[in-house]
Amino acid sequence: MKYIDICYGEYAAKWGLADFYPESEAKLREALDSGEDFDTYYGCKKEIRYCRITRDEKSVTVSVESCMDDLYESDELIYDALWARLHTEEELPDETIEAITDHCYDLNLCDRGEAVTILPREATFEEIVNAIEANESESEELNSVTFKTVCDIVESYYKELRGQEQS
């Protein structure tokens, strides 16, 4: 399978995964028009989102991944949740961060939403764009649900921490 680089510079799209730069759109259309199997992977400049489009002998697979700040390798998402829910930038103790992270891990929370659509091999550019947009929306909705759960967890630990300090 041939890998097609559709990126213009670092990215193939600007605001969202279907907002292609003209050069990137032309490369993708060319790959589709060729009739050959191909694989491509790209991101967009303004959001942490990635798309993989693969055409093989049977189908076109459109996979989208939307990422939030890291939940397990840093504390960024926890502090995003603290600000979103409680409007504070107060630093939390390391053991509280660890407890929140462990709680999230126990719930199998993921800091990225993913969605996949499988289309017929003959899918048009427009059908692929529609799949990209639908998958982007679905993956962002998954992130929203996860973020709300993280906010609930952070709020619970924060209130427990503040309750302990007042005792």
Image (cartoon, grey):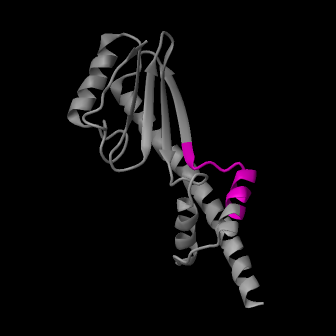
Residue 107 showing in the rendered view: no
**Which residue is painted at 24% across and 37% down in the image?**
21
Residue bounds of the magenta highlight: 99-113
Quadrant of the image containing the N terminus: top left
Q: Is residue 112 inside the magenta stretch?
A: yes
| Residue farthest along the left direction in this orientation | 22
* Residue 58 shown left or right of residue 36 in the figure: right
Residue 128, position as x, y percentages in the image: 40, 29
Quadrant of the image containing the C terminus: bottom right
Residue 148, position as x, y percentages in the image: 61, 62
**Which residue is painted at 55% across and 52% down in the image?**
143
* Residue 16 shown left or right of residue 159 in the figure: left
* Residue 24 shown left or right of residue 120 in the figure: left
Residue 12, position as x, y percentages in the image: 30, 36
Residue 135 showing in the rendered view: yes
Q: Quadrant of residue 53?
A: top left
Q: Is residue 61 inside the magenta stretch?
A: no
Where 130 falls versus 16 (above or below)?
above
* Residue 97 shown left or right of residue 117 in the figure: right
| Residue farthest along the front direction in this orientation | 94
Where 3 falls versus 107 (above or below)?
above
Residue 64, position as x, y percentages in the image: 48, 37
**Which residue is painted at 72% across and 57% down in the image?**
102
